[in-house]
Image (cartoon, rainbow, N blue to C red):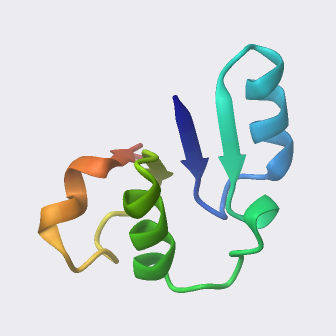
Amino acid sequence: MNILLDEMYPPALASALREYGIETLAVAEQGLAGRPDADVLAGAVADGIPYLASVVATFPDEAVVDRIIYLDG
């Protein structure tokens, strides 16, 4: 399973997780840094990839919230 890390997480974290066998992509590695959260999430949902985010309030479509892995503070 792949996990897409929000751009607030450094690409080094994605790299470290891959070293442990966790297929992880960083938003920055995908050329998506600076794109609106809704666009990044839409791409993740289209690709069937869970999206690790720190804030879910910026995602307007409640139908896709189940695709977000939310970490609180």
> Residue at (51%, 85%) from the top-left corner?
36
2 vs 57: above or below: above
> Residue at (40%, 79%) from the top-left corner?
38
Q: Nearer the viewer, residue 29 or 48?
A: 48
19 vs 68: above or below: above
- Residue 59 image offset from top left, x and y in percent: 30, 74
Q: Nearer the viewer, residue 32 or 58?
A: 32
**20 left or right of 35?**
right
> Residue at (60%, 50%) from the top-left corner?
5
> Residue at (78%, 52%) from the top-left corner?
10
Where on the picture, by quarter, is residue 60?
A: bottom left
Where on the picture, by quarter, is residue 24?
A: top right
- Residue 11 image offset from top left, x and y in percent: 82, 50
Which residue reaches farthest left?
Answer: 63
**32 left or right of 31?**
left
Which residue reaches farthest front?
Answer: 47
- Residue 70 image offset from top left, x and y in percent: 36, 46
**23 left or right of 61?**
right
24 vs 18: above or below: below
- Residue 47 image offset from top left, x and y in percent: 46, 55
Which residue reaches farthest top?
Answer: 20
| Number of marks drawn | 0
